[in-house]
Image (cartoon, grey):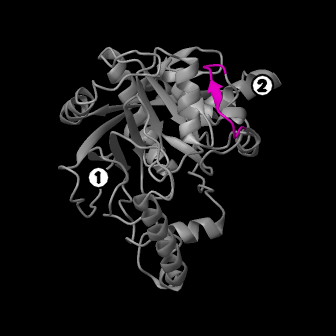
C-alpha cells in the first residue's frame, strides 16, 4: 500500500506568517514599519530613563531573583530553561519558587498554580512548570505582587525564578539569563519592524550579571556585559506518554502506520524536525499558534481525519489530555513527547557563584539562603 504523501502544514494566519518572515530580513515590509519602530524605541528609551531617575519604582526583594527571559517576540526556550534551573537548584539544596505572567490565564491578581491547575485559568507554561518540577508557582500580572504572594504562601522558598520578565523592570534581579533560538535577533530592528522587544545589545535592567543562552545555533551581536554565550543541549525524551498515563518508547512509535504531529508553540517546525531526526515518519503536521487553546487543539485533531497516531508537545498535552478525558475521547491516539534540556556545567557553575554572593539576603521570615 502506498504511503500517504505529507500534507502541507497549516501554520499561523497568512498575515502573521508574512510579518514573521519580514522580521528575519530587512526587506520592504520591515522598512515600511521602521517609523513605528522608531516611536517604539523612543518610548523604550523614555521608560528606561524614568527607571534610572527613580521616577518609576523598582523593588528589591529580600530573596535572590533570577530572571529567565528573551528580548525577541515569541518563545525561545525559556520554559525548558526554567525547568532545568529549578531542578538544578533543588538538587543543590535551594528551595526555589517560580513566578510568571501566566500567558492566557484569567487572573490578574496573584494566583497559585498547582500540578492539577486548569491551564485555561493559570496559563499552560506555569502549569507545565508546576507539574515538571513540583516547586511552588505563582502567576500574576505584576511580578512583585506575585513574588510577595509566593513568599507569604511558601516561607520555605529562598530563591525566586521569574519565567520571562526581561522587560518587567519593576522587579530587580540578581542575575538575568537571556535565551535565544535559531532566529537570533532577526533583522536587528525593534518591533514592529523586527523581532526585538528591546534594543540588543543595550543596558539590561538590574545589577546582577547577564548570561546569554542559545537553545539553537544562531549568530547574535555580543553583549558587553555578558561573558561568552552558553549552549543548551536539547533532545526529545525517550518515552512518550498518553492521556491515560501509559508510556511507550519513542522508537516503538516508528512502527505506527499513520503518524502525525501537532504543536502549539512558538517554533512548531523545530519540534517536527526533532521528531523526524528520531526516525519518526510524519505523514501530517499541524503548526498551531503559540499557546493554542483547548478548542483549537481539539478542532485540529478532528479536522485531520481518523486513524492517525498523534504526537504533541508536553505544553499542548497539558490542555489536550484533560479535555480528551473530560469529553470521553481519551481513546484518541495522542502521545506527548517531552523535551529534555541540559545546560552547560560552566553556566550552572557561574550561576551558582552568583547565588553564593547572595547569601546575605534572607527571606522576610528569617530563612537564610543556603
Q: Position of residue 216 (x, y in %)?
A: 33, 49
Which residue sits at x=59%, y=55%? 9
From the viewer's side, name the closer residue of 346 and 24: 346
From the viewer's side, name the closer residue of 272 and 267: 267
From which residue to which does the magenta span run?
Answer: 107-116
Q: Are marks 2 and 1 in contact (CB under 8 Å)?
A: no
Question: Comparing marks 2 and 1, which lies closer to the viewer?
Answer: 1
Q: Please state if 312 lies on the left or on the right of 350 as rendered.
A: right
Per the model, the C-alpha gap separating discs 2 and 1 is 40 Å
Secondary structure under the numbered disc 1 in the rendered image:
loop
Which residue sits at x=53%, y=17%? 154
Q: How many marks?
A: 2
From the viewer's side, name the closer residue of 112 and 27: 112
Q: Mark 2 highlights which residue?
A: 329
Q: Position of residue 153 (x, y in %)?
A: 58, 19
Q: Position of residue 353 (x, y in %)?
A: 20, 30
Q: Please state if 18 lies on the left or on the right of 232 as rendered.
A: right
State yes or no: residue 253 in magenta: no
Question: Residue 218 appears in which quarter of the rendering?
Answer: bottom left
Secondary structure under the numbered disc 2 in the rendered image:
loop
Which residue sits at x=63%, y=56%? 10
Q: Position of residue 50 (x, y in %)?
A: 47, 63
Question: Residue 203 appears in which quarter of the rendering?
Answer: bottom left
Mark on residue 217? Answer: 1
Of callouts 2 and 1, the N-terminal one:
1
State yes or no: residue 113 in magenta: yes
Instruction: Locate the C terminus and report the quarter of the image it occupies.
Output: top left
Question: Residue 262 appears in which quarter of the rendering?
Answer: top right
Amino acid at each position: 500500500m502506498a504511503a500517504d504523501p505529507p500534507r502541507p502544514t497549516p501554520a499561523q494566519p497568512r498575515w502573521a506568517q508574512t510579518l514573521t518572515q519580514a522580521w528575519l530580513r530587512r526587506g520592504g515590509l520591515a522598512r515600511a514599519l521602521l517609523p513605528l519602530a522608531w516611536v517604539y524605541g523612543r518610548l523604550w528609551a523614555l521608560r528606561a530613563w524614568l527607571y534610572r531617575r527613580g521616577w518609576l519604582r523598582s523593588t528589591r526583594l529580600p530573596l535572590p531573583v533570577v530572571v529567565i527571559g528573551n528580548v525577541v517576540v515569541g518563545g525561545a526556550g525559556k520554559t525548558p530553561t526554567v525547568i532545568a534551573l529549578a531542578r538544578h537548584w533543588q538538587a543543590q539544596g535551594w528551595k526555589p519558587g517560580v513566578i510568571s505572567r501566566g500567558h492566557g490565564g484569567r487572573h490578574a491578581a496573584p494566583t497559585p498554580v498547582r500540578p492539577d491547575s486548569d491551564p485555561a485559568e493559570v496559563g499552560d507554561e506555569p502549569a507545565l512548570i508546576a507539574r515538571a518540577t513540583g516547586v511552588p508557582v505563582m502567576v500574576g500580572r505584576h511580578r512583585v505582587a506575585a513574588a510577595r504572594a509566593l513568599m507569604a504562601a511558601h516561607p520555605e522558598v529562598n530563591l525566586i525564578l521569574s519565567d520571562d520578565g526581561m522587560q518587567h523592570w519593576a522587579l530587580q534581579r540578581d542575575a538575568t539569563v537571556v535565551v535565544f533560538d535559531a532566529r537570533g535577533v532577526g533583522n536587528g530592528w525593534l518591533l514592529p519592524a523586527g523581532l526585538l522587544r528591546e534594543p540588543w545589545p543595550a543596558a539590561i535592567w538590574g545589577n546582577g550579571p547577564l548570561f546569554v543562552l542559545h537553545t539553537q545555533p544562531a549568530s547574535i551581536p555580543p553583549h558587553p556585559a555578558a561573558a561568552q554565550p552558553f549552549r543548551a543541549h536539547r533532545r526529545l525524551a525517550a518515552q512518550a506518554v498518553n492521556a491515560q498515563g501509559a508510556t511507550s518508547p519513542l522508537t516503538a512509535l516508528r512502527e505506527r502506520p499513520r503518524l502525525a504531529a501537532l504543536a502549539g508553540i512558538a517554533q512548531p517546525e523545530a519540534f517536527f524536525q526533532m521528531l523526524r531526526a528520531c526516525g519518526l515518519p510524519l505523514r501530517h503536521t499541524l503548526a498551531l499558534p503559540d499557546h493554542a487553546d483547548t478548542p483549537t487543539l481539539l478542532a485540529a485533531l478532528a479536522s485531520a481525519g481518523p486513524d492517525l497516531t498523534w504526537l504533541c508537545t508536553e505544553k499542548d498535552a497539558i490542555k489536550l489530555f484533560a479535555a480528551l478525558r473530560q469529553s470521553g475521547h481519551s481513546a484518541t491516539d495522542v502521545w506527548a513527547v517531552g523535551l529534555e534540556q541540559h545546560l552547560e556545567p560552566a553556566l550552572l557553575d557561574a550561576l551558582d557563584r552568583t547565588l553564593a554572593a547572595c547569601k546575605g539576603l534572607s527571606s522576610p521570615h528569617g530563612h537564610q539562603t543556603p
